[in-house]
Amino acid sequence: MENGIKVVLPLFNTEQRTAIKSGSIEYNLEGKYTKLTGSVGIDDKTKNSNALGTLKIIGDGKELTVLGNLKGGDLPKNIDIDITNISKLQISFTRDDNGELIIDLVDAKLY
């Protein structure tokens, strides 16, 4: 994968043998950008998984976009989100209990 973020949500944490069903990353934008674009989809490595995933884009604690029921084999979904005056941007990923899932956010750009 080029130009993107890959989040792997495996079935278990191998050290603790606990289920891993979510993850997130936060960026400090300091209000310097007005738009986030890119594409979101399920990586080909888990295209046959029965799991469903959700991606949330959160700006300053407010949900800006929610892409739910992401599953292997679906076409990527484009995002074009207004982030004007957003100080902190969080990208959150979750999956259900039906298998491993890799969610890709590719060609993400801030304007």
Image (cartoon, rainbow, N blue to C red):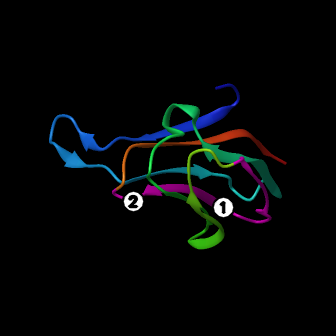
Of residues 28 and 39, the one drawn nearer to the viewer in this rendering: 39
Coordinates of residue 13 in the picture (x, y in percent): 24, 40
Of all residues shown, which one is farthest toward the bottom? Answer: 62
Residue at the disc numbered 2:
96
Is residue 28 in view from this perspective? yes
Say which label, 1 or 2, has the lower sequence index.
1
Q: Is residue 19 left or right of residue 97?
A: left
- Residue type highlighted by circle 2: Asp
Q: Is residue 77 left or right of residue 103?
A: right
The part of the chain drawn in magenta is 75-97
> Which residue occupies 33% across, 57% down?
97
Coordinates of residue 78 in the picture (x, y in percent): 78, 52
Of residues 47 and 26, the one drawn nearer to the viewer in this rendering: 47
Residue at the disc numbered 1:
87
> Which residue occupies 54% across, 39% down?
47
Q: Residues within 10 Å of mark 1 (few under 14, many from 20)?
A: some
